[in-house]
Amino acid sequence: MHLIIFGAPGVGKGTQAKMISKNFLIPQVSTGDMLREAVKNETELGKLAQSYMKKGHLVPDDLILKIIKERCLKSDCYSGYILDGFPRTIPQAEGLAQLMIDMQLPPFTLVEVIVPDNIIIERLTGRKTCESCGADYNKLNNPAPADNICTVCGGNITTRQDDNEKTIKNRLNVYREQTTPVKHFYQERGKFISINGNQSVDQVYQSIVNKINQLDESEQTH
Ligand code: AMP
């Protein structure tokens, strides 16, 4: 299964990608997580990426395409994967289309998750994230423990540097201007489903699975 989980920052892409990864046994390939790891380890990529990430801007396409190609060639990606946070621009979508041809991959299904902006801002300003495993906590419905030790992996829970109101607004503008065209790219060329993300985590997950199954069934009957 080759999926893209798509939507504005804060719609729950990472949470859903983790659930899909666990239940369908395919890896979650998150460009945001890979970049944060590079920043933490102070690699060349991390040093280049940090200034863009801090402001909520996009990291240049050539750097992103390079890390995606390297990651997707790894053996755990052999029977599929879920892309989280990529592609975010038309050149990235075109790069992925070329990769599909080069690696003879089946078409990706783009799963769009939609949440109103006011809910996104509320979610992201109250979000804390585990530095080690990326688990998300939220003061609204899943508060972090008082000691900020992750209940999933024992890692350190912190607030992401880009989860402040000014940077969140930048990220939403960048999404509107540079990333939404990617949705039309897949609506015209590929497989596309849209989900209401303003429901409980389990309801969103179930909606995604139902719509993927419906898409598979309709393809089999055509
Ligand atoms: P995320 O964790 O997906 O919200 O990504 C956090 C930040 O990493 C973004 O605001 C960008 O600065 C950078 N980033 C992640 N994925 C990409 C991508 N596909 N293209 C460009 N920049 C990205």
Image: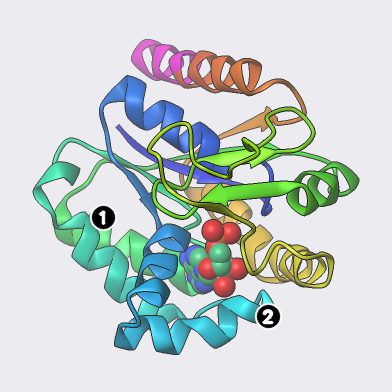
Residue for point 53% across, 36% down: 15
**Would you name the residue on which mark 2 appears?**
55
Which region is colored magenta? 213-222
Look at label 1 and name its amino acid: Met
Residue for point 27% across, 34% down: 26
Q: Is mark 2 within 8 Å of ligand 1?
A: yes
Residue for point 14% across, 57% down: 73
Where does residue 82 sit, x and y in percent of width and height?
Answer: 37, 41
Task: Judge by depth and name the residue closer to the eye, 130 or 166.
Answer: 130
Examine the rendered structure and indicate whether residue 116 appears above or below residue 40.
above
On screen, residue 57 versus residue 130, left or right, reads right
Q: Main secondary structure of the magenta part?
A: helix
Give the quarter of the figure containing the N terminus.
Answer: top left
Task: Give the mark nearer the N terminus: 1 vs 2.
Answer: 2
Q: Residue furthest front?
A: 147
Where does residue 75 sit, x and y in percent of width and height?
Answer: 9, 47
Q: Nearer the viewer, mark 1 or mark 2?
A: 2
Count of marks overlaid on the render = 2
**Would you name the residue on which mark 1 appears?**
100
